[in-house]
Image (cartoon, rainbow, N blue to C red):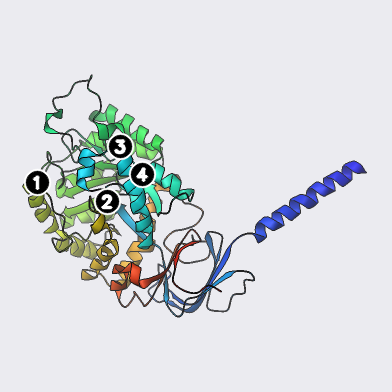
Amino acid sequence: MIKHLSLLCVFVFWGATSAGAQEAVQQTLITNVHVFDGANEQRIENANVLIEGNLIAAVSTHPITAEGATLIDGGGSTLIPGLIDAHWHTLYCCNPQSVVVTGDILEVAVRGAIGSEKTLMRGFTSVRDVGGNSFAIKRMIDKREIDGPRILPSGPPVTQTGGHFDYRPYQAVPSNAADSKWYWYSVGLMAQADGVPEVTKTSREIMRMGASQLKIAGGGGVSSTYDPLDVRQFTKAEIEAFVEVADTYNTYVASHIFTDEATRIAVEAGVKSIEHGFLMSRETMELMRDNDVWLSVQPLLDDEDGFTFNDPESQRKWIEVTDGTDRTYTTAKEVGVKVAFGTDILFDPALAERQGAFLAKLKRWYEPFEVLKMATSGNAELLALAGPRHPYRAGPLGVIKEGAYADLILVDGNPLEDIDLVASPHENFDLIMKDGVIYKNTLSLN
């Protein structure tokens, strides 16, 4: 009898604890909003959205009863999914170039962590980090020890000798086996590999670090010194080795490339995301479309937000690349290749504050609905290529529907009519929520 009574007490205690845990789930009810769900052009008018924990529990045009929930009256504003930047550099964006030249990894990381909070407060609740050692920042954000967006890290971007990301001083070559690694290679800010064996090992090391996908340099760059734009970096066999390692981890390779021939070789080798691509032909875009390859292109123009370089050759290359921006977007839209939105802001904390303004620039080629869809559910589709390496799989990103992550922005106005609203997030975003947690709220709570 005592034994049975003890078991009964255990089950009663377990049941009470479970019930208590269920009751303790935080609920937030947002009422009186018009919902852009991330996928459909028409807003869901006069809607209510219930959040339970970190997921959306209900979206309804009928009243929702949620006793004890935190109530937020949206006042007829527009609720949109959190924005996604598919080409972001957590560390490079917020460190002046002088720090990369003379600083150390601690300074770079601290500046990146501070910048991550600012990224979130601009409404970007998720980023695909395509280069840099952002693993510790990601872990601390996920543990809510610091504020910032969800990060899908690529880890150190991989260059060949003399390729993009080979920022070593001129005297670094010729090298020999006894040489120590360059500082930024040794701390994982960048990486270098030559030949299939090195490519294979380096790729595995980066995946071991916790990468969601691999990022390589498959062609010449603007900001780097020793690689003309026309150079095809990595042989096809080397690129195939990157792809094979990524495939063994059930993920994919993204490649920095501008030019036509380099892009074709990368696509044939199995790369699934072309970063930039400003100098490609229509035929190569058609090849990308037919092989289900993404074009992750950025609205980079030689305008008031144009990048400036101390090196005259880099500045010349910048002009050559940005001269192709208009044609790239126009042709990509005509061809029907999948296009992702990103910014690629480098070495300029002040320019990073213009992240939303870069998104608004897409109005030059797209309607507001197309812009918002690209930066929400569209980019989320690209992020999903990481498969089981995607660190956020409890629900979909980039949409407002039952079961999706509660990454939400309340916009004062209708960005489907005026996309410029996203260019000034501090003025126009009344609510920013990520993972069910409110990080900004200028509205009253009840």
Q: Residues within 10 Å of mark 1 (few under 14, many from 20)?
A: few
For label 2, the residue is 93
Q: Is residue 43 above or below residue 54?
A: below
Return the residue at label 3.
Answer: 242
Report the number of discs. 4
Using the numbered discs, state the Cα–Cα distance from disc 3 to disc 2 in whole angstroms.
Answer: 26 Å
| Labels 4 and 3: the sequence-earlier one | 4
Distance from disc 4 to disc 2, alpha carbons, whole Å, reads: 12 Å
Looking at the image, tell me whether mark 4 or mark 1 is earlier in sequence order: 4
Residue 441, placed above or below residue 243 = below
Q: Position of residue 65 (x, y in %)?
A: 62, 74
Label 2, label 1: how many angstroms apart (C-alpha)? 19 Å
Q: In the displayed orientation, state which residue is furthest to the top.
A: 178
Residue 8, horizontal then vertical, whole percent: 84, 48
Say whether disc 3 or disc 2 marks the residue closer to the N-terminus: 2
How would you rate the neighbour count of disc 2 (Cα within 10 Å): few for under 14, some for 14-19, many for 20 or more? many
